[in-house]
Image (spheres, coloured by chain):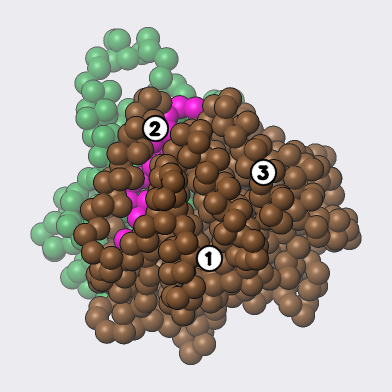
Amino acid sequence: MKKILIFGATSAIAEATARLWAQDGNRMFLVARDAERVEEQCKDLVIRGAESARHTVLDLNDFERHKEAIKQAAQAMQGVDIALIAHGTLGDQKACEQSFERTLKELNTNAISVISLSTHLANLFEQQKNGTLVVISSVAGDRGRQSNYVYGTAKGMVTLFLQGVRNRLHPSGIRVITIKPGMVDTPMTSSFRKGALWSTPETIARDIYRGVATGKDIIYTPGYWKPIMKIIKSIPESIFKKMAL
Amino acid sequence: MMEISGWGRYPRIAAEVWRPYSIEQITHSLRSKGTQIARGLGRSYGDSALASRVSEIHYLDHFIEFDAHTGFLSCAAGVSLDTILQVFVPRGWFLPVTPGTRFVTIGGAIASDVHGKNHHKEGTFSQHVSHIDMLLGNGERVGASRTENPLLFKATCGGMGLTGIILAATLKLKPIRSSEIIQTTIKAPNLDRIHEEFEMHSGASYSVAWIDCLARGKQLGRSLLMLGEHAVDGELRAPIPPQLPMPFDLPPFILNRSSVKTFNAFYYNQMRHTHTMHRVSYYSFFYPLDRITDWNRLYGRPGFLQYQFVLPKQDGLRGLRTVLETIAQTGRGSFLAVLKAFGPSNPNYLSFPQEGYTLALDFKTGPSVFKLLDTLDRIVLDHGGRLYLAKDARMKEATFKASYPHWRTFEEIRARYHALGKFASLQSQRLGLQ
């Protein structure tokens, strides 16, 4: 039995992952913004096999309350073995270009709040001398592209921050796992046309579940994104800047 | 806009498909003009889940409550039978009724009022549903059961999604002691014999026959009857069975008269003995076709038509003989032909089963098939039978109205519960429903 804490629990990827963990009889604590949905989800997880599932309602842009929420979860579950940070928004890139306020809002939601949570969790794990921090970043954070660079910047910041945390906590035996999904068919991407490279939250969830069990550092999911991103990262900037990506 | 179709891949249409992730969103969508139809996993064969606007209930997929003493399970309509099996088989519970695929949603199972190999004993799926939570066309949320809005309940079970959107339901799971099935296979050399065997084994929990519909003359109706009982000892396991992909459309010429004939003869004759008994997993007994993902691509790009009819008991055998003779004459072999003896019908207005025999066939789509099926429709109507709406893509309005006599009551109830002008499918329009 593991004690699992999930931020942004009602997001499609988090929900699918939570269901896999629930079937193994784990103890769970969910943090989400939508009270009704997270209550529903707790009941669902217990029916699927979770030992228990409790929750707290929180808007993760309220950084002040992060520490308190983690404390509450650790008390309720008597510790935290795995923490998954899964919340996020896909802002309107065009609107962000016209408005720094919107850009800042996107960066706060997708990067700063994740950095805040990761900081508190890293310290908790260090104190506990065990723990696994799992964070959903994105392939979009691997290189800046005109179509999506505000979201990409936030995710890139998260990826880089986690590299540092992983390096810092390695001697303490604490694992930090960066998840880099490609395009996933979720409510967040409902307005997009879906092509062959799109995958489902269930596929991403299985990769996260397996990755946490085996202890990888960085997980591209589905796996084909690893070679794709390798190619994209290897294109010289002088050429890349002319491309419509 | 995206291209969608039913499981038979005929017809295909361009539709506006959206996946609401909350009930509020669906309620909101009902305010706009025009009709919509709910869709689950898209396993109905024809056009019953096709419309210019389709709401996929994919995200309404959480469990709500489970009573481990009684087996009553409440869940959202988008939960699939596959998920229920994964979660509950290891704890000793099974579906009370299951169709031949586990990739259907609870909402879809109720809307099509599906049946399984135990219809002769347990009736249809909805007969094990005690309560439905629905969203009506005016945005109102109501409950429906045998005591609460009973007419709405009878119209919704088997109502093809035309009464409103099913949000959640409560059904009673069945206790099992093993996840395995004791399967007995019996060879029946002709139609009279398979009829006798069905009669003789009416006490079996599960029964279904594979029938060789290309056999003629003395061999007309030769079949393999498969009976099943839940094992009473052994493990309770719900492994994820391996699935073979079907990554491309089979070229249309591969399934033809002689290949089907060869396959059928091989399949029938590989059974050496008249009786054989095996212990098999529940998924190989109930879901043999789920082993191949996208098996519908076997029929190639044009798709196929499923044709399932029921003939009432008295006179049913004679009608069945006429149908089989007509098919054998044309030489249009159905690769999969399944025969089953149904138990009594239920009071739902559009539920398909009637006491008698049901035969399910599939045919590669093509102009001559439509003519053949029109001929078969005539035979079915002459013998007092009808066609299964979950499989239909081409029945004429007159055929439907002659064989589903409660269609007027169904329409009255739809009107009373604000469904008119809100819910419609290509099928409902074709069948002359409002």
Q: Which of A136 and B335 is in front in this view?
A: B335
Which amino acid, mark 1?
A: Ala
Chain where mark 3 sits = B
Read off the residue under disc 2.
Answer: B257
The quadrant of the image that shows the N terminus of chain A is: bottom left
Q: Which chain is green?
A: A
Pointer 1 residue: B341
Residue at the spot of label 3: B377
Q: Which residue is drawn at 64% across and 61% down?
A: B315
The hue of chain B in the figure is brown
x and y percentages locating residue A12 in the rendered image: 47, 52
Give the answer, above or below, for where A25 lies relative to B255: below
Residue at screen point 62% across, 66% down: B313
Please say if A147 is above or below B303. Answer: above
Classify the position of the C terminus of chain A by image quarter.
top left
Residue range of the region highlighted in magenta in the rendering: B283-302
Residue B138 at what x, y percent from top left?
83, 55
Q: Quadrant of residue A34?
A: bottom right
